[in-house]
Image (cartoon, rainbow, N blue to C red):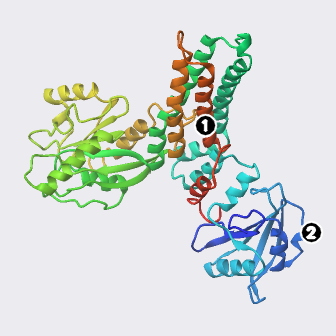
Amino acid sequence: MTIHDINDTICAISTPPGIGGIAVIRISGPDAIATADKIWHGRPLAQAPGQTLRYGTVDAPDGTRLDDAVAAIYRAPHSYTGQDTVEISVHGSTYIQHTLLQSLTAAGARLAAPGEYTRRALAAGKLDLPQAEAVADIIAARSRAEHRIAATQMRGGYSARLRTLRDTLIDIASLLELELDFSEEDVQFADRADLLNRATQLRDEITRLEHTFATGNAIRQGIPTAIVGHTNAGKSSLLNALLNDDRAIVSDIHGTTRDIIEDTATIGDYTIRFIDTAGIRDTSDTIEQLGIQRSRRAIGTARILILVLDPTSPTLDTDTIPAGTGATPIDTHLIIAINKTDIAPSSTISDTPHFRHYQRTLQSIYRTVDTIGISAATGQGLDTLREAILRAAGQGLDHSDIIVTNERHRQALADALPPLDAVIAALAPGSPVTGDLIAQDLRTVISTLSTIIGDITTPDLLTTIFSRFCIGK
């Protein structure tokens, strides 16, 4: 018997750790109902139809009454795991929860391993592997955008897209291998130009999916938003105001922030990962220089930049993000936040010829450029700034399409491209490559996509995937 034996009856707390109004203990396996009946007082659960509730009490291991409870009965195969399942709801005391687990293990159940319920759902055909992975993602979702992507994957849209791609590859491979069977008769079952066109379309679709990972990963981890500017422009004050927390030290002393500070906040549909950077200036301080170097790297990798300008500065600080910092015009959105409008109007900067020229230069570099007057000290303009961040975060996203968020999937898609490129080259007019070699490369692509769907798996792969699940799921 192994820890993942699907014939075991398993139990676990399925609600979050801690104290709450109720807690749910899930029992699943061939003997789930009989095991629950051993510690249950009330109408016998064994006599209950599936998808029904029973009210009763549950016992502590010594046989004394532990708590009032409600049991939900799900009979196989109509349950999450495809097995008989009982979910017992009790009061949310941590003592009651753990004592009830002790009662169930004494009655013959064992504690579930991380993700074991979902692993059983996978084994029962209730979910495929991307859907199973989406279960963990939907539990961890912090924003509407994360939830939307995970829900699409859990409903099977992503798997359906991959299966369509794989089926097309199988169709191409079968035509080529059929030709090999009739090679002596010199029979051609498919037009090479048609196969080349289909393979090229597949390559373009796989490439597009692989490229969506950058967006998907940003949505999952928080869209990187760097707050940049000269020293004392008010970057740390702005971070604290956006987070509604004293996350960064604020001081009139130049160079207070010497390293990047990161924290997240949910704005609208998105989780935003704010990065407060060291003020950029010429300095002989070695530690501050390192912080400035990190600031410039953050400028090059952020999807959103908030350039904080100080209208009271005689130099206007408009040299913070010159051209050539590494920002990508297609992907990076710039918001110029003219701070301290409570003591100086934003027009102090925005109406000058120097700023207007600088603004036009930035508009040729970045995907979008917004200019907003704010006061981090009083909160003036912060709602407008949040709206600009929200627009930038959602710019160019098609929420009806598939977005890849899983590094395992991205790597498999990337691995599928070289053999598919070899297929396309071999199908080109005048190529000397034979059909058997083309078919071999096609089989490699098919196998690689099958690892994403879960048609080809290994125990180590499944263990790695489900180890990041919570115990009760």
Asked if residue 24 shows in the view, the reply is: no
Q: Which residue in the structure is indicated by mark 1? A: 449
- Indicate the quadrant containing the C terminus: top left, top right, bottom left or bottom right: bottom right
The label on residue 194 is none
Element under disc 1 = helix
Q: Is residue 192 above or below residue 282?
A: above
User: Could you say where residue 354 lies in the image, as x and y percent from the top left?
Assistant: 14, 29
Q: In this view, does 195 lie to the left or right of 268?
A: right
Question: Closest to the observer: 338 or 333?
Answer: 333
Q: Which residue in the structure is indicated by mark 2? A: 47
Question: Closest to the observer: 239 or 415?
Answer: 415
Q: What residue type is labelled 2?
A: Gln
Q: Is residue 64 left or right of residue 173?
A: right
Q: Which residue is drawn at 18% across and 39% down?
A: 320
Q: In this view, does 99 lie to the left or right of 148?
A: right
Q: In this view, does 418 lie above or below 456?
A: above
Q: Could you classify mark 1 by the number of other residues whose Cα lies within 10 Å: few (under 14), some (14-19), or many (20 or more)?
A: many
Asked if residue 215 shows in the view, the reply is: yes
